[in-house]
C-alpha cells in the first residue's frame, strides 16, 4: 500500500492520509553524483499556490505559442508580424519598435534589466522565477498534466511503474510519450515562427518547402523539450542549472523562502491525542508526508533549506490542506524570512536552552502567543532590493527615453583609401567617398544630402546626377540602406591641406536631420 490512514479518534487524524513518500533528494542523505536516478511521482496538489501556477503556466505558454501569430500593421513596406527576428534583413520587430543592428545596445539593456530583475525577485521572494516562470518548470508542469491524464495520479503511476509489462501498460506509456513528442514538435515549431512570417512558414513547413534549417531547429528543440521536460525533469534543476548555486549570494535574512516552521511543528506526532494524554509535548506536524509527496524535486522541506528547492510552494498547499482537516491554522509550512524564523525559534527553545516546547509558543487555549513574529511586507523595502529596483528602473527609463527620442535617419561616410585625393589638370582637388543613407522607417522618402563647410566645394554622385552641386535630393527606399558613390571637388587655388567638413542629410517632411563629420585631403595633408 502507498498510503496509511491514521486512526486517532477525536484528534481529526482519521481524515489524514499518511503517504509512503521518501525524499529522493534528501539533504540528510545525498546520493552519489553518478548513482542511477530514482523516479519521482509527484502527487497533484490543490490550493492557492497550485492555482497560481496554473495561471502562470497558461499565460507563459500562451505568450510563447501565440505571439508569432499576432499581426501588426506597419504599412506596405514592412512585415506585419508583431514580433519578428528578421535575420535576413537584420531587423528585430517588436510591435511598434524596430531595432537595427547598430542599435543592439537595446538588447543589451534588456539583458541587464533581466539580470537585475532576477536579482530583485530572488532577494525579495527567493527562487520564485524557478518555481513559477522558468521554462523548465513550466514544461515539466505541462508534461505532468499529460502524465496524470493518461496514467493517473501518484499511486496509480507508482503501481503502473512497478507492474510487469502488459498491453495496458504499453498503451499508456506509448500514448504518454507520443503526446510528449507532440508537445516538443509544437514547441520547436513555435520557435521557428519568430524568425519568419508565421503563416507563410507554416505552409512551407507542412508542404516540405521550408529551409532545411527550420527542420533541423524543430528536430533539435523537440528532442531537448522531450528529454529535459519529460525524462530528466528535476535533474536539470539540480545538476545542469547554475542558479541554485548562485542564489545564495542573492538571499539574506530578510528574503522570503518556503520554510517549515519546526518551532510550531515539532515534536511530530502521528497520534497526537495519545501523546498529549501521556504528557508528551506535541507539535502540529502529524508526519503525514503530504509535503514530500507533492514535491516535484523529491525533497523533504522539513529538512530545512536545500539547494534543490525551487520554492514552488506546493508543499505549502499540501500542508495547509492537512491543517484544514485538523482544524488548525495554516502556516506550518509557509513563506517566511530567516529573521522571523530565528525569532520564533528562539522563543520556542528559550534561546537554545532547551528543545522545542509547544507550550512556549501557544497560550492554554491553543492560540499563538503575541510574541510570535509574522511576516511584514515592509521588510521587502530594504537597501538591497531598493538598489536592484533603482538600477532596473534606471536602465528601463534610459531605454524608453532613447527609444522615444532616437532619430530614424542616419548617414555614414567612408573615405576612399586609395587614392586619398586626385589632383585634376585644372588644379582642382577631388576626394572620393562612399555615403550610406539609412532610412529607418517603413516608408519611402526623399533625403536632401548637402555639404556644410569647405567653401567652393561641390559634389557629384555617380549614376545619379551629371552636374556637380552642393546639394542633391535623393529618393531612398523604405527601411533600407541606400549606398552612394560620390566625389567632392574643391576649386583650384583652395587650401591644399586637410580640411574638416560635414555631410548633412535632412528630411524636411519628417523634420529629421543627420550629420557626419568628414575630412577632405589635399597634397599638403599629413600622411
Image: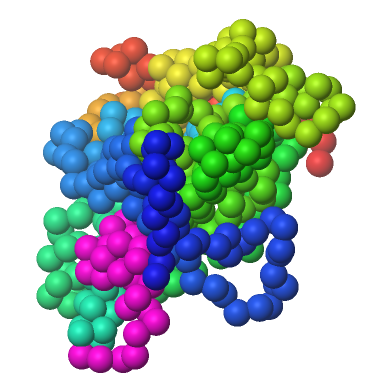
Question: In the picture shown, does residue 496 fall above or below 152?
Answer: above
Relative horizontal placement of residue 247, taking residue 9 as reference (left or right): right
Q: Residue furthest right?
A: 353
Q: Nearer the viewer, residue 120 or 373?
A: 373
Give the residue drawn at x 67%, y 48%. 303
Tag count? 0
Q: Which residue appears at 74% of the width and 37% of the height?
A: 249
Q: Residue at x 29, y 76 (%)?
A: 177
Name the image quarter holding the N terminus.
bottom left
What kind of colouring is applied to the model shown? rainbow
State whether residue 63 appears in this view.
no
Task: Give whichever of 50, 409 is nearer the camera.
Answer: 50
**The C terminus lies in quadrant:** top right
Q: Is residue 192 left or right of residue 268?
A: left
* 106 and 152: which is toward the camera: 152
- Is 393 magenta? The answer is no
Residue 328: % across, % down: 44, 28
Q: Is residue 275 above or below residue 339?
A: below
Let me know if residue 61 appears in the view.
yes
Magenta highlight range: 140-167
Q: Residue furthest front?
A: 278
The answer to whether residue 161 is magenta is yes
- Whole-percent x, y for residue 77 in the image: 19, 40
Which image quadrant for residue 195? bottom left
Kindly identify the residue that appears in the image at 58 percent across and 15 percent down. Answer: 364
Task: From the top left corner, tell me how far across and down residue 492 is, in percent.
Answer: 61, 28
Does the magenta stretch mainly form a helix, a strand or a loop? helix
Q: Position of residue 304 (x, y in %)?
A: 67, 43
Residue 75: quarter of image = top left
Which residue is nearer to you in this view: 256 or 156? 156
Q: Against 219, is 449 above or below?
A: above
- Left or right relative to 525: residue 488: left
Amino acid at each position: 500500500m502507498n498510503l496509511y490512514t491514521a486512526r486517532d479518534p477525536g484528534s481529526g487524524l482519521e481524515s489524514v492520509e499518511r503517504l509512503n513518500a521518501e525524499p529522493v533528494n534528501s539533504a540528510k542523505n545525498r546520493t552519489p553524483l553518478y548513482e542511477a536516478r530514482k523516479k519521482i511521482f509527484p502527487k497533484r496538489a490543490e490550493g492557492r499556490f497550485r492555482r497560481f501556477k496554473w495561471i502562470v503556466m497558461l499565460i507563459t505558454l500562451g505568450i510563447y505559442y501565440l505571439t508569432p501569430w499576432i499581426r501588426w500593421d506597419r504599412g506596405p513596406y514592412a512585415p506585419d508580424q508583431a514580433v519578428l527576428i528578421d535575420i535576413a534583413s537584420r531587423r528585430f520587430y517588436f510591435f511598434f519598435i524596430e531595432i537595427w543592428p547598430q542599435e543592439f545596445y537595446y538588447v543589451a539593456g534588456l539583458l541587464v534589466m533581466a539580470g537585475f530583475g532576477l536579482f530583485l525577485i530572488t532577494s525579495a521572494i527567493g527562487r520564485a522565477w524557478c518555481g513559477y516562470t522558468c521554462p523548465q518548470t513550466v514544461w515539466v508542469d505541462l508534461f505532468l498534466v499529460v502524465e496524470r491524464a493518461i496514467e493517473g495520479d501518484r499511486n496509480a503511476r507508482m503501481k503502473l511503474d512497478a507492474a510487469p509489462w502488459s498491453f495496458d501498460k504499453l498503451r499508456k506509456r506509448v500514448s504518454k510519450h507520443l503526446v510528449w513528442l507532440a508537445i516538443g514538435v509544437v514547441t520547436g515549431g513555435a520557435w521557428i515562427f519568430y524568425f519568419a512570417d508565421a503563416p507563410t512558414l507554416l505552409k512551407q513547413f507542412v508542404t516540405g518547402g521550408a529551409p532545411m534549417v527550420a527542420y533541423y531547429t524543430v528536430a533539435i528543440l523537440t528532442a531537448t523539450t522531450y528529454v529535459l521536460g519529460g525524462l530528466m525533469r528535476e535533474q536539470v534543476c539540480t545538476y545542469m542549472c547554475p542558479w541554485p548555486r548562485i542564489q545564495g549570494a542573492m538571499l539574506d535574512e530578510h528574503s522570503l523562502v518556503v520554510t517549515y516552521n519546526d518551532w510550531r511543528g515539532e515534536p511530530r506526532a502521528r497520534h497526537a491525542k495519545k501523546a498529549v494524554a501521556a504528557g508528551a509535548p506535541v507539535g502540529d506536524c502529524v508526519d503525514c508526508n503530504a509535503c514530500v509527496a507533492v514535491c516535484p524535486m523529491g525533497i523533504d522541506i522539513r529538512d530545512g533549506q536545500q539547494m534543490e528547492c525551487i520554492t514552488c510552494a506546493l508543499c505549502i498547499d499540501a500542508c495547509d490542506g492537512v491543517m484544514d482537516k485538523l482544524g488548525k491554522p495554516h502556516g506550518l509550512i509557509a513563506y517566511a524570512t530567516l529573521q522571523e524564523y530565528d525569532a520564533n525559534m528562539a522563543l520556542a527553545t528559550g534561546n537554545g536552552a532547551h528543545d522545542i516546547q509547544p507550550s512556549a509558543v501557544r497560550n492554554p487555549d491553543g492560540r499563538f502567543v503575541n510574541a510570535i513574529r509574522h511576516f511584514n511586507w515592509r521588510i521587502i523595502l530594504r537597501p538591497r532590493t531598493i538598489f536592484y529596483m533603482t538600477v532596473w528602473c534606471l536602465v528601463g527609463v534610459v531605454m524608453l527615453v532613447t527609444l522615444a527620442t532616437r532619430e530614424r535617419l542616419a548617414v555614414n561616410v567612408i573615405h576612399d583609401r586609395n587614392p586619398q585625393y586626385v589632383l585634376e589638370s585644372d588644379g582642382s582637388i577631388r576626394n572620393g567617398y562612399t555615403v550610406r543613407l539609412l532610412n529607418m522607417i517603413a516608408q519611402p522618402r526623399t533625403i536632401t544630402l548637402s555639404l556644410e563647410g569647405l567653401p567652393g566645394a561641390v559634389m557629384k554622385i555617380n549614376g545619379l546626377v551629371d552636374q556637380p552641386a552642393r546639394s542633391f535630393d535623393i529618393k531612398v527606399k523604405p527601411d533600407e540602406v541606400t549606398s552612394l558613390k560620390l566625389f567632392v571637388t574643391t576649386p583650384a587655388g583652395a587650401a591644399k591641406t586637410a580640411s574638416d567638413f560635414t555631410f548633412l542629410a535632412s528630411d524636411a517632411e519628417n523634420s529629421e536631420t543627420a550629420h557626419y563629420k568628414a575630412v577632405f585631403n589635399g597634397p599638403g595633408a599629413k600622411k
